[in-house]
Amino acid sequence: MKKGFVYLTGAGPGDPDLITVKALNALAQADCIIYDFLANSALVDGHACEKIYVGKKGGHHTLPQEAINALIIQKAREGKTVVRLKGGDPFIFGRGGEEAEDLVDAGIPFAIIPGISSFYSAPAYAGIPVTHRDFATAMEVVTGHRREDAADGEDVNFPEYDSDRTFIFLMGVKNLPHITDSLMSKKHFPPETPVALISWGTRPEQRVVTGTLQDIVARIEKEKIKPPSIIIAGGVVTLREKLRWFDNQPLFGKKIVVTRTRRQSSKLSQKLRSLGAAVIEFPTIEIRPEQDLSGLETAIRNLREFAWLFFTSQNAAAIFFDRIFSMGLDVRALAAVKIAAIGPATGDELNKYGLKPDLIPKEFVAESLLEEALSLQMQGARVLLPCAREARSVLADGLQKLGATVERIHIYETIKPENIEHETIAAVQEADLITFTSSSTARNFFSLVPSVQADLASIGPVTSDTVRELGHSLAIEASEYTIDGLVQAITNHYSNIQGYV
């Protein structure tokens, strides 16, 4: 039987891009992921392995720690590669040391994958450096509450005051009145000591409240700040307004839905997140290659008979080359044929195979591709057009009118996903903006979610026409029909609303 292995892994502070490469590699090979409340769900979504949530939220525990330890051991003894995914770093106030001890006692091999801790990353995202030559030459990190089984009279290990030090309290929001009072009355911290509370640090939900030891409790009660939050005290807090950057971004806090396939969503999602958006991935289409691709195989064997090969999507290019390679051929099979791509994204897909398209139109729609073909010698030319079953006939019909012989081969179809989680649909209903990158994403989305309150954004006029045909209006349409163009249009829209430009 396969021997199990456990990775005690830090998920980072919340921003999914702050996870380490080693942690991502562990997740990719996991048979079972056991994850916490503070581990961003985006890190878990998309993995087909067994996933078990054991989060602790507001004192409510899915499982007690002892049961979590037993569960990790059980899954490892089943021969599985287990990733125990913990918020921040597993060895910084994360009880990872206790889990490791139990693994040793059980004879289970394991590795520790450190993670970026919130105690310095959340302040960094709030524009607060934990050390600074003018304010703090040292820092101290303290747990903000007692352990659950603490003896009566046992208290937080409050630090001694030092004006050249930064003090960071983790897990102390509910205990804040006691912390501030104790620091001032017992440890003689000046009441005017600058303090900040950072809630959901590094995430689009991040909120920051600043004040002093004397007034911070009233301020957070007014703002209704809840856990998870960290408390930071010291002179470095005064740099917040000058250095804040994350919550100044044009898309900060905007909940934006991405409706592309899981395979294609990463680029758009990443660009939106980099501008501060909270991305909700809601893949409304799946790409299903046709079961019978014998027609494509015949065309590939006879590629020398074609003058042009037209690709109108990344998906068509990917499936086409998968079939070429599965037939034992390589890109040399295309030596005699010229290649046209509908836009730069499709061109990028071709670049992966060392190919540069002979033709990319100025506007990335079939009509523009057809317009460019007017300057080519199409009379009598034989054109291969591998495409989706539901693709528009504009290009094929237009090329035939120019005198070309077009062999249109359906190599895939776009279908609706079979299962959409209720939590995802609920999140979509609370979104600020929903993006559509094709007519298929729009049709399938509105068949799954008939009505929404969010604004709608389209990658270009063809997709926009479909949205309007479905009875909906658009707030945003990209002037350049690419992912970059869509992101720029969204950024311009919110920047204008918020007065950034």
Image (cartoon, helix red, strand yellow):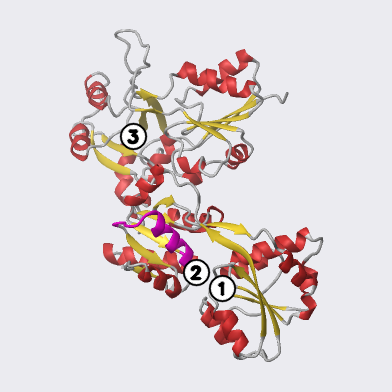
Marker disc for residue 482? 2
Mark 1: give few (<14), some (14-19) or many (20+) Cα within 10 Å. Answer: many
Which amino acid is tagged 2? Answer: Thr
Q: 52 or 140: which is nearer to us?
A: 52
Q: 206 or 393: which is nearer to us?
A: 393
Given this view, does label 3 or label 1 mark the residue nearer the observer? 1
Contact between labelled residues 2 and 3, with CB atoms less than 8 Å apart? no
- The residue singled out by tag 1 in the image is 343
Does residue 438 show up magenta in the picture? yes
Q: Is residue 222 left or right of residue 271?
A: left
| Among the 4 quarters of the image, the one containing residue 422 | top left
Question: Split into 4 quadrants, where in the image is the N terminus?
Answer: top right
Which amino acid is tagged 1? Answer: Gly
Question: Split into 4 quadrants, where in the image is the C terminus?
Answer: bottom left
Query: If you read the primary sequence from the N terminus, does the residue marked by circle 3 or circle 2 appear first?
Result: 3
Q: 260 or 418: which is nearer to us?
A: 418
Q: Is residue 68 left or right of residue 327?
A: left
- The residue singled out by tag 3 in the image is 229
Q: Residue at the right extreme?
A: 328
Query: If you read the primary sequence from the N terminus, does the residue marked by circle 3 or circle 1 appear first?
Result: 3
Residue 148 screen position, x and y as percent = 36, 15
Q: Is residue 368 left or right of residue 316?
A: left
> Which residue is rendered at x = 63% and y = 80% of the image?
359
* C-alpha span from label 3 to label 2: 38 Å
Contact between labelled residues 2 and 1, with CB atoms less than 8 Å apart? yes
Q: Which region is colored magenta? A: 437-453
